[in-house]
Image (spheres, rainbow, N blue to C red):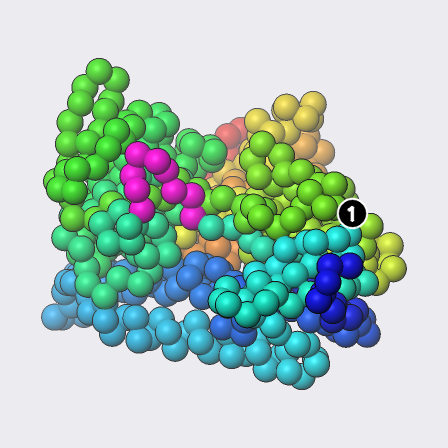
Amino acid sequence: MVVGELPDQVDFLVVGGGPGGYVAALVAAQLGRKVVVVDVLGEAGLGGVCVNVGCIPSKALIELAHENYERASWACRGLPGSESGQVNMADFQVWKEQVTSGLNGGIQQLFRTAGIEVRQGFFRFTRKDQGAVDYGDERPPMHIKFKSCIVATGSRPTHIPTLKHDGIRIVDSTDVLALHEVPQRVAVVGGGYIGIELGTALAKVGSHVTIVEALPRILAAMPSHIVSPVAKRLNEIGVTVLTDTVVTHDDGKQLHIQKGDEVSALDVDLVVVAVGRTPNTHDLGLEVLGVQPNSRGLLEVGPDLLIAPNIAAIGDIVPGPALAHKASAEAHVAAEVLCGHAETFAPVAIPAVVFSDPEIATTGMTVDDAKAAGLDASAAMFPMAASGRARTLDESAGLVQIVHTPDGVILGAQAVGPHVSELIGELTFAIEMGANVADLAGTIHPHPTVSETWVEAARVAMGMPIHVSPKRPRKV
């Protein structure tokens, strides 16, 4: 032991208070453990990036932008005097703070009820059962010895060398959500889900937006026919999308780009770097545990989520989609495992959503995924244009489709359209339960709702559609 090192004895330590960490802490407390959470922001950090500077505030901005943009379309639907325009971002920041602080305060109350202690500081392992909490000031670090530990340190926006982040002109997703004025001309570097969500929102609050993507198309990881309605809508709202285009540098007034041999520049007031997120696995003292992050900075784990005896890792720092709900699901398993219960993290499907316009939601396998896995699969599609509820929303663009085996077992689903973020959980449940299209078709859904489109797609798969024409006559 280092001279002067007097470790505090802790039963169950959680490093990080995000959607993985705070859920893990609550589950461990429910299982009878005495829990201490260490977060770099202390209680203010509970909820993590998701609640404070990510999922929640970004969706608040997206909703504000959507309502602002939609006001103009309501004029032709019978609502006079409806006009879209620039929003008051200062007022938005006040409202956003109320939303995020309310959720953060709710987690604090849950912690107090559960008897969970929160300490502020940066944690680093110094031994296999011990670590130090650095307060970030002149105070000596606090040493903690633990029986069990979950590492849930999350991720941060990825910065790129060619665009030096300054938080003023060159910004990341966190900075965008703190804007107090609507920027006039914006370049969004990156056409993944973060870039598409932020670019769409900024365009709808009044910015002139250009999205610069190095790959041949936006949202390249998703099927092209699912992305097509989103690409079309971006064009409709005035967003310029430049694909196969890379950024070379920014000179403070212009963003210089290159497509093939063609070099050009964009006059922009703000450059949003949205090229992904980087796992927070740096400087954690993992070498003490004999653990080394992989080439992507992730910690490899098995179904038990352990990286060392009595230490688990969850969330954005382990392989799999960097999604808040995936981290929370892993939290349950990790806490159970460290409390001696036989649990594993082995989901059949993890849903994912892009809060674009229209929304995109996916779960399970695509047809290509299924074929790559050696499965015989096909997709049954139903268009939003045939949905009465979608029509009342003036949102006829999009579709839902179900990926299934020849005998009807549901393998996956993809959707693009209004409110599909609220629908994808149902298909994820169907996949986990091993349901088939007949089960879905036979489940009565309320009318008129967008959820009915799943039933219609299931009936298409069975060759018995109602609201679209069958491809061939039904056998009798």
The residue beneath circle 1 is 308
Query: Residue 272, image x and y in percent?
Result: 29, 46
Residue 18 vs 192, above or below: the answer is below
Label 1, residues with CA under 10 Å away: few <14, some 14-19, many ≥20: some
Q: Which residues are magenta?
A: 157-165
Could you tell me how many numbered marks the image carries?
1
**Residue at image point 75% right, 53% down:** 127
**Residue 315 colored in magenta in the image:** no
Q: Residue at x 64, y 68 (%)?
A: 142
Residue 390, located in which quarter of the rendered image? bottom left
- In this rendered view, identify the residue nearer to me: 406 or 269: 269
**Who's the residue at 39% across and 47% down the image?**
194
- Above or below residue 373? Residue 339 is below
Question: Is residue 132 found left or right of 396 in the rendered image?
Answer: right
In the image, is 128 to the left or to the right of 356?
right
- Answer whether residue 162 is magenta in the image: yes
Hey, what amino acid is under mark 1? Ala
